[in-house]
Amino acid sequence: MPGIQRAKSEETQRRVLEAAIRAVEAGGMEAVQIRRIAAEAGYSVGSVYKHYEDQDALIAAVDTVTLERIKTDMSNAIEGIEDPLNQLKTLARTYLEFARRHRNLWVTLFTHHLPDGRPVPESHIQGTVDLLTFVAVPLKKLNPDLTEDLLAARTRTCFSALHGLVSISLEERFVGLPGDEMDREMMFLVERLAAK
């Protein structure tokens, strides 16, 4: 009997999370309203609260899924690519494409903040570390003399620069770059950041 109850509980949690993901995809994090998610998933509001403390906890779970999806896309994209510079360029293109295709999920990932005093979920921390590792490995191959501290700083610099370029362009700010220009300049940025 406990096994059946556990399976039902896991199914409830999965369906609630899937409903929240769909809500974010359709309307951004503002669309994650507990009553709406409960109705969409086919459960009571109380059932949602059994699995997610509040709206912030549910959005944090969506963010963890988003990180996993980015990680999967990046892993698949660089499979079979040996050249570290080409790996970095492919990772950059993959990151941009994910942001373009899943804009609301991507924006929510970087704009949602948990209330003060609430720890970031370990899965979210690990997902972020995994993304940075994708950048760090080819950077180290291109710059084998970097110390661990400098490699960590350079990795964050590269990720932050790329993220900023993508963010400004997707927000369609006047300094952002359209289409082909964006792709060309992103490759320029990667080459400069990866240089010794």
Image (cartoon, rainbow, N blue to C red):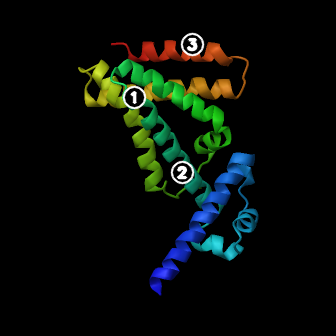
Q: Secondary structure at mark 1?
A: helix
What is the spatial separation of the Cα atoms under label 2 and label 3, in whole angstroms?
Answer: 30 Å
Quarter of the image for the C terminus: give it: top left
Q: Please say if the residues under marks 3 and 1 sit with CB atoms less than 8 Å apart.
A: no
| Side of 59 where 2 appears, left or right | left
**Could you say which disc has been placed on residue 65 in the image?**
2
Amino acid identity at mark 2: Val
Q: Nearer the viewer, residue 173 or 139?
A: 139
Q: Please say if the residues under marks 2 and 3 sit with CB atoms less than 8 Å apart.
A: no
Amino acid identity at mark 1: Thr
Count of marks placed on residues: 3
**Could you say which disc has been placed on residue 155 in the image?**
1
Q: Residue at x 73, y 51 (%)?
A: 30
> Can you tell which quarter of the image residue 99 is in?
top right
Q: Secondary structure at mark 2?
A: helix
Q: Nearer the viewer, residue 53 or 62?
A: 62
Q: Is residue 28 visible?
A: no
Q: Is residue 21 above or below residue 69?
A: below
What is the spatial separation of the Cα atoms under label 2 and label 1, in whole angstroms?
Answer: 23 Å
Q: Which residue is mark 3?
A: 184
| Side of 64 where 172 appears, left or right | right
User: Which is closer to the viewer, label 2 or label 1?
Assistant: 2
Tell me where residue 40 appears, x and y as whole percent: 73, 64
